[in-house]
Amino acid sequence: MKPKVKKIVKFLGNIITLLAIFFIFKKLFSSDIDYSDLFKAKNILFISIVILVQAAIVITNCLPWTKLVEVLTNKHLSFTDTVPVYAKSNLLKYLPGNIFQYVGRNELALKKNIPHVEVATATIIDVMMTVLAAAIISVVFLSHFILSFLGQHSQTIKIVLLIAFIVLIALLIVIYLLRNKLKLKTRKYSYLLRPKTLKTLLFCLVYYIIVMMISSLMYMLVLIFVLNIPLDFSLFFKLFSAYTLSWLIGFITPGAPAGIGIKEAVMVAVSGGLINVDIITLSMVVFRVLSTLSDALGFVFSLPFTRKNKKIWRIDDEK
């Protein structure tokens, strides 16, 4: 890319990042939380643990995406190449629209002169692996709740399955009609079935399963030690697993239902009403605030990598 164009793109990127930081502060100050009560001396240790662990997750989350970009582009990328782009784009999720955190990752294509399509494809696969990991955790640990829910809404499930079946038949017909054109297209992406690619996909899946369980554990720290909610083992296990399920349903559901938020609704349903709705809501709000601080801290952690790479990018521009 020409240096002049690159400067313009960089300027626009900085403006968007500043906007994201503005919305982060807006979110923090609009949260219905008494910060003086939250950051009491007795809470500092556990709050620090949650913020630091979640910030570390922000940084390490670029690893699966990096591996996917490498596989799709057949180009080696170091951690220092991708972490500044990933951490900055992660801040963009606070901008209205909820898509900028994914679009922002394509800054890597500009800086490393790699195809935009491959970077975008890596991002899509990365998101799919995250959703699949959450689904696996939910099915393994909350199978009884899910089966019970499906049994209670059997009529609705039948309608959904019928619609899905009709869509599938229509899709198969379209594939059959366009089979010749699709053959040419799919040949281009045959490398996705290589052993190296499949190993990368497995790595991403295992990584996200582990990370989601760590995030659930951080939520439980907030619930038990910051908000002082006593839990027996059974309820701890239910809420620990429910946090991932609530994230999954919140992610795949467009909009939000009336009344309490969708995540809170799932948490209350899984706990069987054994915990007050107000407590669940407060714990989720507190955790969102701490996660927001973690996102900002993750971005700060990435700044040394940004400065380190400036010289490299400048050399690339001269070339």
Image: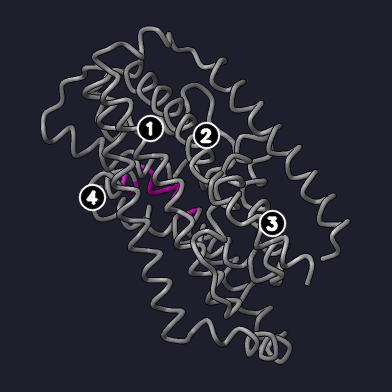
User: Count of labels shown?
Assistant: 4
Residue 172 location (% of width, % of height): 61, 78
Q: Which residues are magenta?
A: 150-159
The disc, 1 or 3, on the residue closer to the chain's N-terminal end is: 1
Image-based side of 200 in relation to 82, left or right:
left
The disc, 1 or 2, on the residue closer to the chain's N-terminal end is: 1
Name which residue lies at 74% across and 45% down: 13
- Element at label 1: helix
Q: Are marks 1 and 4 in contact (CB under 8 Å)?
A: no
- Element at label 4: helix
Gap between marks 1 and 4, in whole Å?
A: 26 Å
The disc, 4 or 3, on the residue closer to the chain's N-terminal end is: 3
Gap between marks 2 and 3, in whole Å?
A: 19 Å
Q: Are marks 2 and 3 in contact (CB under 8 Å)?
A: no
- Element at label 2: helix
Image-based side of 11 in relation to 200, left or right:
right
Gap between marks 4 and 2, in whole Å?
A: 31 Å
Residue 217 location (% of width, % of height): 26, 39
Binning the other alpha carbons within 10 Å of mark 1 as few (below 14), some (14 to 19) or many (20 upward) gives: many
The disc, 4 or 2, on the residue closer to the chain's N-terminal end is: 4
Gap between marks 1 and 3, in whole Å?
A: 27 Å
- Element at label 3: helix
Which of the pair 147/242 is nearer the observer?
A: 242
Q: Looking at numbered disc 1 in the image, what kind of residue is underneath it?
A: Ile
Q: Are marks 1 and 3 in contact (CB under 8 Å)?
A: no
Identify the residue position indicated by label 1 in the image: 51
Identify the residue position indicated by label 4 in the image: 141
Magenta stretch: dominant SS?
helix
Name which residue lies at 25% across and 47% down: 142
Image-based side of 106 in relation to 212, left or right:
right
Which of the pair 55/148 is nearer the observer?
A: 55
